[in-house]
Amino acid sequence: MARWFVGRAAMNEAIDIDLIDLAEANLPATLKDVPPPEVEATNSRLADADAFVMITPEYNHGYPASLKLALDSARDEWMAKPVSFVSYGGMAGGLRSVEQLRQVCAELHMVSIRDCVSLHNCHGLFDEAGLLKEPSAPDAAVRTMLDRLLWWAVALRDARAERPYGA
Ligand SMILES: Cc1cc2nc3c(=O)[nH]c(=O)nc-3n(C[C@H](O)[C@H](O)[C@H](O)COP(=O)(O)O)c2cc1C
């Protein structure tokens, strides 16, 4: 799913992508007073970003613990930046995960944008080459989401540069 999304997003020349795979980030399962190097390394990549796209499945109507841990392990790195979502799962396409994430992202002072990408019944969507069998609707959703995300990324980057976000 991430490979597909990054492939589509990379077509937009205005975007530089840094893909953080939480399965490889090795964040410790509990929060520490002094962040270990793995947390520092991930957070420094988050700090460099002007916008976020969270790619999330849905497990038992929720998003994975690895994503919550990443959210809780940073603070200022998220603030005053826009976020959108690519979600996938069974019938609901991961949308319950997205609605839960919007609540958490608001607490972290992120701006969650309206448009996201949702793929339902995800196991049958890709062919053996990893390409979507029916790409037109998802591709259009990615374009719309990225257009809106970019608008907010530029607006909030300029605003942060003009006046530091105090929280
Ligand atoms: C334990 C478990 C619970 C799941 N619960 C949901 C669910 O509540 N809603 C949904 O849409 N899909 C659900 N699924 C389907 C997963 O979202 C789907 O298998 C997805 O591919 C998992 O993402 P991953 O392969 O990246 O881990 C569940 C799958 C498992 C194994």
Image (cartoon, grey):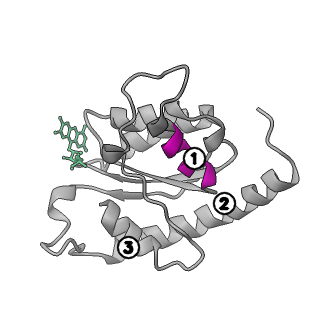
Q: In this view, does 164 lie to the left or right of 8?
A: right
Whether 62 is drawn above or below 117: the answer is above
Q: State the residue position of label 3.
A: 7
Q: Does the residue labelled 2 lie within 8 Å of ligand 1?
A: no
Tags 2 and 1 touching, CB below 8 Å: no
Q: What element carries label 3?
A: helix
Whether 61 is drawn above or below 134: the answer is above
The residue most toward the right is 162
Q: State the residue position of label 2.
A: 153
Q: Which of marks 1 and 3 is in front?
A: 1
Q: Which amino acid does label 3 sit on?
A: Gly
Q: Residue at x 67, y 59 (%)?
A: 152
Q: Pick whichever of labels 3 and 2 is earlier in the sequence.
A: 3
Q: In this view, does 10 lie to the left or right of 134?
A: right
* Image location of residue 153, percent across then percent down: 66, 60
Q: Nearer the viewer, residue 62 or 7?
A: 7
The part of the chain drawn in magenta is 40-48
Q: State the residue position of label 1.
A: 44
Whether 97 is drawn above or below 90: the answer is above
The N terminus - image quarter: bottom left
* Image location of residue 26, percent across then percent down: 35, 38
